[in-house]
Amino acid sequence: MNPLSIRHAVAADVDMLSAIESAGFPPAEAASADRIRERVAVYGSHFWLLTDASGRILAFINGMATDRPDLTDNMYEDASMHDPYGAWQMIFGVTTAPEFRHHGYASLLMRRMIDDTRMAGRRGLVLTCKDRLVGFYERFGYADEGVSASTHGDVVWHQMRLTFPSTHREEA
């Protein structure tokens, strides 16, 4: 048996994360090793990594927290926009190493990220995805808000949002 675990990113993970990112996205969409290094340095706790018993990274999700309600292209480039107390958890990428795809690893990580984000008291999560992935994210409760203003990688993106029910009574 090969038990799996989920942990957050540290500097030593950057090379492997970069390799998985490059294999998972076209060059215009993939974050560079330098960008990943910067993100890990600023918000490594906002990377969820699925690893096997040997410590090999099988899949990961990353993003930043912010009070801004929509995911904008400048968030991909500027790690300083991260607010550890932000109301919204943005997701920049959900990536599985090619040899580990179709085992449910991305779904496992997404469920954990949703749970962790809810426990952190955030309002919810926001991501952008290509049209073919809208249904995948809807299975987790994300709502398609339509085509995003994002032009990241010269691609048409849909903005998806998962909003948690309020845990307190709204003031009138």
Image (cartoon, helix red, strand yellow):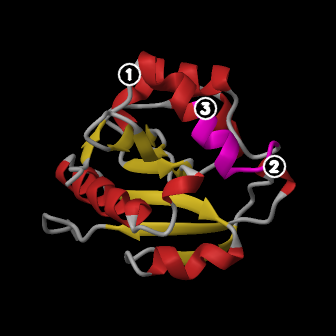
Q: Is residue 172 magenta?
A: no
Q: Is residue 156 left or right of residue 117?
A: right
Label 3, secondary structure: give it.
helix
Q: Amino acid at mark 2?
A: Gly
Q: Quadrant of residue 140?
A: bottom left
Q: Label 2, on which residue? A: 153
Report, in whole angstroms, how far the alpha carbon at label 2 lies from the one at label 1: 26 Å
Q: Where, quadrant-wise, is the N terminus in this rendering?
A: bottom left
Q: Is residue 36 left or right of residue 83?
A: right
Check disc 1: other Cα within 10 Å, few if <14, some if 14-19, many if 20+. some
Q: Amino acid at mark 3?
A: Ser
Rendered view: 88 above or below 130:
above
N-terminal of the pair, mark 2 or mark 3, is 3
Q: Label 3, on which residue? A: 18
Q: Position of residue 76 (x, y in %)?
A: 64, 37
Which of label 2 and label 1 is nearer to you?
A: 1
